[in-house]
Image (cartoon, helix red, strand yellow):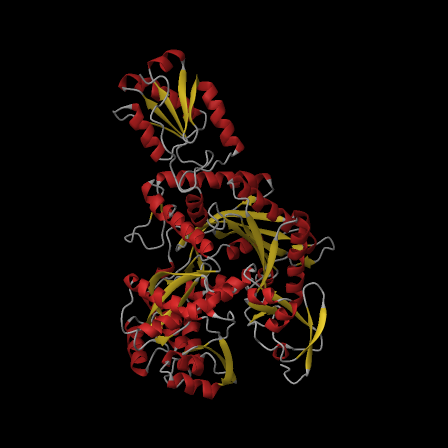
Amino acid sequence: MSTAAPSVQVQLPDGTLAEHPAQTTSMDVAKGISEGLARSVIAAEVDGKIVDADRPLGELATGDGPLSLKLLTSRDPDALDVLRHSAAHVMARAVMRLYEGVSLAFGPTTEGGFYYDFDIPEKISEDDFPKIEAEIKKIIKDKEPFERFVIDRDEARKLCDDLNQDLKVEHIDTGLADQDTVSFYRQGEFVDLCRGPHIPDAGKIKAIKLMSIAGSHWKGDTSGRQLQRLYGTAFFDKKELADYLEQIEEAKRRDHRVLGKQHGLFAINPEVGQGLCLWLPKGARVRVTLENFLRTELLSRGYDPVYSPHIGRVELYETSGHFPYYRDSQFAPLFGSEVGGLLDAWSRRLESGTIDADGEDKLMAAVETLGVELPNYKPSMTNEQKIAVLNEWQHNNERYLLKPMNCPHHCHIFKAQPRSYRQLPLRLFEFGTVYRHEQTGELNGMLRVRGLTQDDAHIFCTADQVEDEFRATIELTKFVLKSVGLDDYRVQLSLRDPDSSKYVGSEQQWDNAEGSLRNVLENSGLEFNEEPGEAAFYGPKADFMVRDCIGRSWQLGTVQLDYNLPERFKLEYNGSDNSAHRPVMIHRAPFGSLERFTGMLIEHFAGAFPMWLSPEQIRVLPLSDKSLDYAVAVARQLDEAGLKVTVDSTGGKVQAKIRNAQLDLVNYMAVVGPKEAETGHVALRDRIDGDLGSMPVAQAIARLQKEVADRTVRQAVKGSAAPAVETGATGNEG
């Protein structure tokens, strides 16, 4: 970092170059343009990094070239994160004013706002929100600035110790042990360890609201210190806050967990297991429709179906690199004997350093009781040596893992037969169920589960075929999203972080892979952004970020490019030169998982599925028991035509039956009485448009079949899963 240079050259987005003294800040540059602009500045982007508007630009110069400077105002998305980060500090300051003995943890931003974790002797409840918000408003009204200062690590530790902030002291000792200096922000009497950046002053916060309170743990360690997490959100104006709160209420009305139970779509029962979804008949019909739709499409595009088992040897996933890389999110290995699980748990305790000599003695005795000897295990060994002995025993005995992903299995399907370049690309697909040991607190209905079925496919191709195949998978994902009425999306190109060591494969392979994906996206016309550090450990990927009808963003379809697994599994094909070559592998899943995709669709459609996806497309409503035989006969014709049909054989007036069908979100109703039976007609009703009049059964069938075939997607009124029901049914119910 250069701070001694007397001046710095700054380039604005319009290309303007200017020389400024090193102590010039971004705010000074803004004032030089206009006072109005300066009043609007929230922060600055300098050489791609978001910083405080009052940071001296000379501190940020890292080379001889000019600094690129972009002044951020409330119109820039990045400015909202800065505002919310500052709002978290304001909230923490208010809490410290109101409560004794507050120990601060961290206060990051989230997708919809921010939170701060506290260790407070007193329990905070939502009843306390009004007084905390009142204190927040006082702080905002004073418009005190956020002031950054930097001190050396030892001085920072003493400062936090003097402030009785023991969590911050621990973080300096452990999380910042490699840092020579540490930054803080001061706002009035409030001082907090923080990297920043922040808004110029608290007066920039025009709308703020506390949202909820929850439990948490220090640094996410469930065995560590319990904390209280206070959530909030903030905006640049009150209308944005009002719109956001309305979206939250709308999301509650569309909660797939509530609608799933109400409409009999799925269930999750603790007696079966948390995070394990039971697809009820109506939900299963939606799933089967999605599977059949995609299966038909894949077969027409040259994919071959395959199946693989639900378990595999641990060595399979060690070869792929998934185990132990994702070990914390996998179920424990399965062994043919009790001792295997015991040794695995023992090894993990050694890895984490949570075992003492007494614990080792007890484990050794337990293992010996089970008839297993570990002659090479010595108490005097290092932990690494002990782990090696335990792992050697495990490797010499069969260990199985509940399948956490399908790709290693598909690699062996490719490897099961000799392959020629003439057979490539080879496209394999499977609706494969995999298992992830998600933390209990992270489970969320169908959206976050422990057993999930991926619409998984793997394409094995030559390097020359990569771009065409990647382009085809992008087009397939676009087609799938369009078919369910999702047309508001962008693509995130997830790249590696060059400074991280978590990625496998050569730099050249990564450069080739990232270049291929970028080239296809640039030529596709799709809106996309690049996110370094978000790639899978084995390759870059393109994720579809989809907005639903109330503006929420979901990560759905994904396409991943992989040079790594073919290398790890030594996959080969015979090339045109009659020598062995390594294929390239593409992973793709337009749905992502059937559970998450269906849960998202339930919320997007508020449970009112479009005709082609609906679990109950039409319900036949007899006017009375006298018309029941005709109703059953009509239902049989509808069923034979491939429509999902039921008959309401309950007693009561037809108006009540219509009302029930509306509430059950049935797309169409066919009212039948003596007149319809005599003429071979039905009185057709649309759930949204109402009475469509009387027509022959064949005409009604043709109309409904066309809507299914066209995959017409019609949204119900926002905020209402069932539109208002007309008081009259048809002209024939008398």
**In the figure, 622 relative to 424: above or below?**
above
Pick the residue in front: 586 or 707: 707
Relative image position of residue 707 (x, y in whole percent): 50, 30
* Quarter of the C terminus within the rendering: top left
Pick the residue in front: 527 or 466: 527
* Quarter of the N terminus within the rendering: bottom right
Relative image position of residue 650 (x, y in whole percent): 27, 26
Relative image position of residue 696 (x, y in whole percent): 44, 16
**In the figure, 374 relative to 729: above or below?**
below
Q: Is 419 positioned to the left or the right of 614 in the image? A: right
Pick the residue in front: 62 or 313: 62
Pick the residue in front: 508 or 28: 28
| Residue 288 picture quarter | top left
Residue 303 visible in rendering:
yes
Relative image position of residue 329 (x, y in whole percent): 42, 63
**Outermost residue to the front:** 35
**Outermost residue to the right:** 577
* Residue at 64% from the left image edge and 56% from the top image edge: 517
**In the figure, 400 relative to 159: above or below?**
above
| Residue 131 picture quarter | bottom left
Q: Is 492 positioned to the left or the right of 686 in the image? A: right
Numbered marks: total: 0
**Outermost residue to the top:** 678
Residue 372 visible in rendering:
no
Q: Is 101 positioned to the left or the right of 312 in the image? A: left
